[in-house]
Image: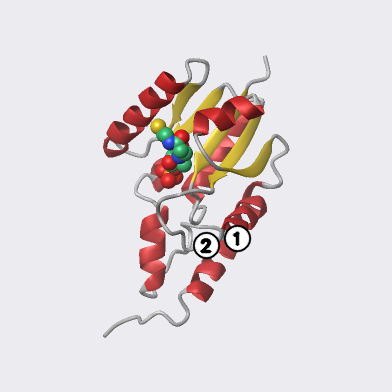
Amino acid sequence: MRIRAVYPGSFDPVTNGHIDLIQRSAQVFGEVIVAILENTEKTPLFTLEERKEMLGEAVGRLKNVSVVSFRGLLVDFAQQIGASVIIRGIRAVSDYEYELQMALMNRRLSSTVETVFMIPAEAYSYLSSRLVKEISAFGGSVKGLVPRQVEKRLAAKYKNYPKSS
Ligand code: PNS
């Protein structure tokens, strides 16, 4: 059976950890839909269009992967697109509590969508979009943590950001 899976997130911006997980998922599932959340509570650094472009550039060459955006409840979106699996990445034990809560709540909302946790490469176990933004804001190097094009976009966003007092 060809399973369609949805990989949701803010992707603000996409990191090499996300890409690693997408590549792994693409080998396990028939189709992977990377879904960027539109109605996030947090104010993103990158616009939805920018986040979509960066993801497209990073994973566009994978034949069974596509990038879309969604609003509203994730389980509703999964059902709309016929996805029976939600993929979430777990980097360390600290991720587990929040992810478990979300997976169980999603199961309560829809018993037909199953959450599958995947583990990224060890090298990315301490990587997050939040840290990447913080490092970039203060002029640190994020080489090897995000694709080259994301590095450049981060540098451009923080061009006029005060580096030190
Ligand atoms: O990358 P993130 O920010 O950790 O992703 C969180 C995301 C997008 C998966 C989560 O916030 C989500 O699914 N939001 C959609 C609204 C929803 O369904 N909320 C109930 C979750 S139990």
Q: Which residue is mark 2?
A: 46
Q: Residue at x 56, y 58 (%)?
A: 147
Q: Residue 139 is drawn in which quadrant? A: bottom left
Horizontal side of residue 107 vs 147, given as left or right: left
Disc 1 on helix, strand or loop? Answer: helix
The amino acid pointed to by label 2 is Phe
Q: Residue at x 66, y 51 (%)?
A: 56
The image's mark for residue 108 is none
Q: Nearer the viewer, residue 66 or 40?
A: 40
Count neighbours of disc 1 (C-alpha within 10 A) and say few if under 14, some if 14 to 19, many if 20 or more: some
Q: Do the numbered discs 2 and 1 sit on residues whose CB atoms are within 8 Å?
A: yes
Q: Which residue is mark 1?
A: 50
Does any portion of residue 9 appear in the rendered image? yes
Residue found at the very far front of the displayed protein: 72
Count neighbours of disc 2 (C-alpha within 10 A) and say few if under 14, some if 14 to 19, many if 20 or more: some
The amino acid pointed to by label 1 is Glu
